[in-house]
Image: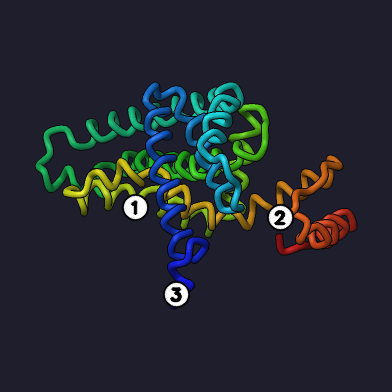
Amino acid sequence: MGGLFDVDGPIMNALQDLMVLVVLNLFTILCCIPVFTAGAALTALHFTIMKMKKGKSGLYKMYFREFKNNLKTMTPTWIVLLLFGIFLAFDYWILYRMASAGESNLAKTKVFLFNSGTDMMKFLFLLEYLGIFIWFAIFVWVFPYGARFVNSIRANLHNALLLATGKLPRTLVMMLFTMLVPFFMLVAFLKVFPLFVALGISLPAYLCSFIYAGVMDPMVRKAKLAAGIPLLDDEEDDKEEVEEKEEKYKKGEKTDS
C-alpha cells in the first residue's frame, strides 16, 4: 500500500497530471479570449496533453510554443468552422422564431424538439440538427488532427469529417465528453463553478485523448514511416505492426486499423 503514495506512485502521478490539466485549462481560457485564437489554443491543448501522457517534460513552454505555431496553421481552419457554427445558430434562431411565433410555452417546447409545425418545417429542423451534429463531429476531431498534421483548411476539415464518420462510435463518445462534462460543471454543480474554470476544457480534452489515441497514433507512425522519418522511442514498439499493415494495404488486403 505504501507504494501508492510514493513520489513516483500512481496517486502522486495522478495529482501531478491533475495540476497540469488545471494550468493548461487556465492557459487555454486566456488564449481563447480573443475568440479568433481559440483554434490555436485548443490545438495546442491537445498536443500538450498527448505529450503529457507520454511523460514529456516542459509542458507549459510546449503549450505556448505550439500555440504560437498553430496561429498560422489552425486559425484559418477555426475561423471557417466558427463562421459555419454562427450560420447554423442564426439559421436555427430564424427557424425557431418562425415556428414558435404566437405559440404557448408548451408549443415552443415542441418546436424545440421539431415536433410542431408543417411537414416542411419539421424537415428544415431535421436538416438543421443534422448540420449541428456534423459541425460538432468535425469540432471534436479537427483539433487533435491539427495537433499532429499540418494541412490546408480544406484538408483539415475534410479529414476531420472522414475521421468523424469513419470512427463514429469514438466520435459519439468524444462528443459526450466534450458536451456533458462542461454541462454538468456549469448546470448540475453551479455552486462549484470554479471547477469549470479549473478543468472545464482540459478535462474533456484529456478524456477524449484516450478515445482518439488509438486512431491518431497509428496515423502519425504511418505518416512518419512513409516519409522516412525516424520513430521516437515510444513509437518503436509498434513499428513492425505498422509496416505489416502497410504491406497488407499495398496488397489490397483489409486491415482492422
Q: Earlier in the sequence, mark 3 or mark 1?
A: 3
Of residues 218 and 256, the one drawn nearer to the viewer in this rendering = 218
Q: Which quarter of the image is occupied by the N terminus? A: bottom left
Please identify the residue farthest to the left as the structure is shown: 104
CA gap between label 3 and label 2 equals 29 Å
Mark 3 / mark 2, whichever is N-terminal? 3
Could you classify mark 1 by the number of other residues whose Cα lies within 10 Å: few (under 14), some (14-19), or many (20 or more)? few
Which residue is tagged 2? 234
Q: Amino acid at mark 2?
A: Asp
Q: Is residue 124 left or right of residue 209?
A: left
Distance of label 3 from label 1 (alpha carbons): 36 Å
| Sooner in the amino-acid sequence: mark 2 or mark 1 | 1
For numbered disc 3, what is the local secondary structure? Answer: helix
Is 71 situated above or below 245?
Answer: above
Q: Residues within 10 Å of mark 2 (few under 14, many from 20)?
A: few
Give the image location of residue 11, x and y in percent: 43, 64
Q: Amino acid at mark 3?
A: Gly
Foreground label between 3 and 1 = 3
